[in-house]
Amino acid sequence: MSRTQYEPLFHDNEGELEQEALLVKDRSVPPIQVRPPTYYGDGPFDAPSSDEEDELLEKGPPTSPGIAERGNPLPQRVSLASERPTSLRLLVIALVSLVALSGIIGIVAAHSYVGTTYHAPGVRKITMDHVFNGTFSAERRSLAWVPEAGDGVFSIIEDGYIKLVDLKTNTTKNLVYTFDVKSANGLPLTWASWKLSPDMKYILVKSDHKKLWRWSSFGNYYIHEIATKQTTALIPPTHPPTVAYATWSPTGESIAYVTGNDLYILPSPTSAAPIRLTTTGSTSLFNGVPSWVYEEEILSAPSALWFSPASSKLAFLTFDESLVDEFTFPIYNPTEDADTVVPYTADVTMKYPKPGFRNPLVEVAVFDLATYLAGGAADPEAQLLALDWAGRHDGDDSVVSEIKWVSDDMLVLKEVNRNADNGSVVLFEKLAMATTLTLAERARGTVVRKLGKDGEEGDEGWIDNFQNIYALPSDLVSSLSAGTVAGAYIDVVPTPEGFNHLALFSPPSSSTPIWLTSGAWEVTKGVLGIDAANGIVYFEAANPLSTSRHLYSVPLPSLNLASPTEKAVLAAPKALTGASEAAEAAAAYYAADFSPQAGFYLLSYMGPGIPSQKVVKAGDSEFEYVLTTNARLGNVTEEYEAASVVHSTIEVDGYELNVKEIRPPRMDDSGRTKYPVLFRVYVPRSFARFCSLPLTPLSCLFFLKKIRYGGPFSQLVDLTFARGDWHEYLACGHSYVIVVVDGRGTGHKGRKLRNPVKGNLGFWETRDQVAAARIWAAKDYVDPQRIGIWGWSYGGFMSAKVVEADAGIHSLAMSVAPVTSWRLYDSIYTERYMNLPALNPGGYINASISNVTAFRNVDYLLAHGSADDNVHFANSAHLLDMFTKARVRNFRFRMFTDSDHGINRRGAQREVYEYMTGFLLEKWGKGGGNGGGSIYFIIQGKRKNGPRG
């Protein structure tokens, strides 16, 4: 089927969020093996009994339908009033009298008091309405930097105009009146996004936005000439649209675009016809746009094409999915009306490679646009280079994970095998030698760095798939090297000690890193910006705390070395956000978005206090442009009850694990009161992760792009602001304790903590969660009979694994959209951590849910969206089949019709949380009673609560 047929009939409003925000800018299956009889060798856990009052919360077998399904979230309790003796009534009457007398005294004292008034802590109760109505939503804005207009210029939409704000001159000017951009029939277009040409004469407008997958979409594109107010279609518009992507070249006026899965270049808006680079586009072959699995797991982008810095060449990927198997799921109701009856379902069919099955075949090509235009060649293939290199992995064992131009004539790429333990960095430096070399010679690359077990990683872990290569600007390279080096780039590379740090490679053919940073901490996002004028690199790091994020700068060393053995003189990084100050200042979480030349940056303080944002001018402490203060949110947080958040660490098997505990207000930890504990594991960092629902697209799309669904390299225990989410509601409204433990496999503490999960997902993480539950069960304030765990996606998998382990400590678990067998998930993600099933059959058994007998011993909730294109509903269907075979009946299941992985179709987002809340209260009741508390462990996932602002 064609890319235009990859047509999910809905996508849970992601498209609308993206559209509004972008307006601001821009076969052989191995047999099933029997699981070993003992999962953990340390035996069941014999939890101590709660106080006698726990008997009031004992429940019988679940009814069908249960209390939660009937809409009554509160458990039924037996009234004991008729059994209380008369002496108790007298005691109650006496106490009431004393309270009334003290109230009268208090009123008199209040009227006669003169002095300073102090505000008491917030007392208003948090409800589910507050979780979803935006009460605790932080206003966050992103700046749409406009590099074409110079450094420090960003765009805003105001009064129908796109306006440019210049921070250097403190001026604002109109760029274009949006209503001037019209279709052929003279009607104003509905904008989805826009891009300014490098010469600022034109804007490229995307209209008729139609969502495809997480990043991709279709649209009709129009070129609008600003001076003449003339608008022309890039190609004749269609309904539905067929253009999958379009973009300007970084210089000049060329436009590259993909339609019908073929790649074209329009040399200028006035050109008579485009240059057609490919003719192979089909229902299973993509040029310049990624296949589903590459979009989801590798590129995190809608395109697979890259112009060189001076626009003389265009690199792109071709994906051949002819041999990739298809997966189909039904859409029961394509409308937004739940009452609509649709007699026949529609199917969504997608190419979805699974572990051990065929992957897309990937080829890399470069089109020499400058040579083609200069020579006037009639056939574009005469300047189309098919890149190749020695030692490339065969066929679909080759995964191209990154492409970057390091100069206008040099390109580097990363390639790894499916197991992600053997890879290379390949340099192509002969691309421009059109007059002296053949196409094949120009297209031949050289391996300059080895990755994996026998390369830079040097251990039993995996090669990360991040896009971190950052090319130094050519003028900066020339300045630093006195013209002796033609190019250089920075990458994030693990040190011999296993921590990710910035490494400079100069020249690009070098295999020896120049370490710009080092230490027992990690750089988290690669290079954020480079000030070429001053030779300064900006980056973000999880330092000094692994749960914090701070902004740093480091100067680049001289690249003009007298001899190959001479070492560059390096300087220590400089903290820009208080990381080197007092502990309180260090315990903070920042993010930064730099202007194109790094003269300015948007600094976002994200917690643990009230979030705020300001624009900073690099090197000018006097300049400050405040963007958001969240004063309203600050006032709101003072009105409502707040959970207490305690950060700590625990040790399991010699590993130090970060922990975050969310406690009810005024919690009694003396042991007289017992609390339930819910462990949270790997819940998706979606809406409530950064903003309380509902989200406003412009303020939250930037953060939605950070969504992760847990698993290896994820992190839940951090210092971001998290007031008013579902977990704080449970803590404040129902006196639950929430615990989050970042176990083995999680990120930003080095490869030593991450690597153990390689080849055996779910095993060591389960040990960590069980060990943490034992630690909390021994605490005086915990009710050991009410300890539970929940998670979404990978977290749902983890919740089920904890139940399967049958440690005897968890009485409740909830899994939302879980993976239940890694043979059902996509190949590139799964094989990175698990290898191919034929090469690791035992690992796949151990990493899946294959023994469900222990599910009889807990209260278990399962929920899944029927149209989940990421973790297919087949995972839950498989688990339900195992329940049927094993006669497991004491579970609760809910399918959310037509919802994808985010579960928000037709009101499902709130409903899934109401459903889980009702389940908790039905099974556990409220916490905080004498001997009647419950602890629910949340397995990494959804939004965490931060300290009060």
Image (cartoon, helix red, strand yellow):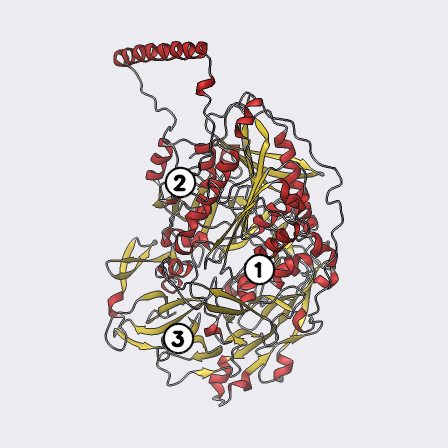
Which residue appears at 49% of the width and 65% of the height? 330
- Mark number, residue 128: 2
Position of 293 with respect to 83 (left or right) is: right
Which residue appears at 64% of the width and 70% of the height? 358
Is label 1 in contact with label 2 (beta carbons under 8 Å)?
no
Which residue bears the numbered disc 3? 253
Give the mark, 3 or 2, whose residue is nearer the N terminus. 2
Q: What residue type is labelled 2?
A: Met
Report if residue 545 is visible in the image. Answer: no
Front-lying residue, 212 or 156: 212
Front-lying residue, 364 or 745: 745
400, above or below 185, in the image: above
Q: Residue furthest front?
A: 82
Label total for image: 3
Give the mark, 3 or 1, whose residue is nearer the N terminus. 3
Which residue bears the numbered disc 1? 874
Give the mark, 1 or 2, whose residue is nearer the N terminus. 2
Q: Residue 490, how many percent across, how many down?
A: 58, 58
672, above or below 825, in the image: above
- Mark number, residue 573: none
Front-lying residue, 477 or 60: 60
